[in-house]
Amino acid sequence: MLDYRGFGLSGGAPKLPDVFWDINAAVHWMSHSGQTKQQAFFILGQSLGASLMLYNAAQHVENPYLCGLISDAAFSRYRRIAAHIARQSWVTWPFHFFLFWQAYDQYDPVDGVAALPETPILFFHSKDDQIIPFSNLDLLVQSHPGYHQRVVTSGRHTATFMDAANRQTLLEFMQQQDCSR
């Protein structure tokens, strides 16, 4: 997991498409660093990070070390999530139609997922998520033509791995994958 620009200890501002440079740099490092000894790896993303990862992973389908993806609470389309968020407040509600058309639809996670038929994906999403509607999970799963697991969780947004059963599901998914490409 990495802190891409504007999050965690990373400086800068998180904007598209610049954040993809951070993801690409991390994948390159995982694939070529002497510290990783060219071992297979998974990419795990949560919320916005999962959405970015699901779109960007299509650039790495030929990477022999990328073994799979783990997505927690991703959204499916930028326009859809922008409209959802704008509707949450009376202050922004009048602008939700404008925001809907201003989003970054060329980077939609649902399109990235459709381009990953050989990449296994573990999808987590809480039915209680108040930030990213649960319906996004169904759209992402339906768009992925390859092997995937769909795990419905409960609890607040991105609290998935606070639950021991979800951590165990994650480990089992990783162990089940054939990472010897």
Image: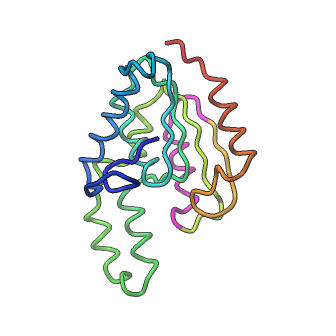
Residue 77 in the image, given as x and y percentages of width and height: 40, 54
The residue sitting at 31% across, 34% down in the picture is 24
The answer to whether residue 10 is above or below residue 94 is above
Relative side of 178 to 99, left or right = right
Examine the image and state in which quarter residue 179 appears: top right
Residue 58 in the image, given as x and y percentages of width and height: 37, 32
Relative side of 48 to 131, left or right = left
The residue sitting at 51% across, 46% down in the picture is 140
Examine the image and state in which quarter residue 59 appears: top left
Relative side of 165 to 110, left or right = right
Residue 71 in the image, given as x and y percentages of width and height: 53, 44
Q: Residue furthest right?
A: 165
Asked whether 29 or 107 is in front, the reply is 29
Relative side of 75 to 102, left or right = right
Q: Magenta stretch: residue 147 in it?
A: yes
Residue range highlighted in magenta: 131-148
Q: Residue furthest top?
A: 180
Residue 118 in the image, given as x and y percentages of width and height: 48, 24
Asked whether 68 or 117 is in front, the reply is 68
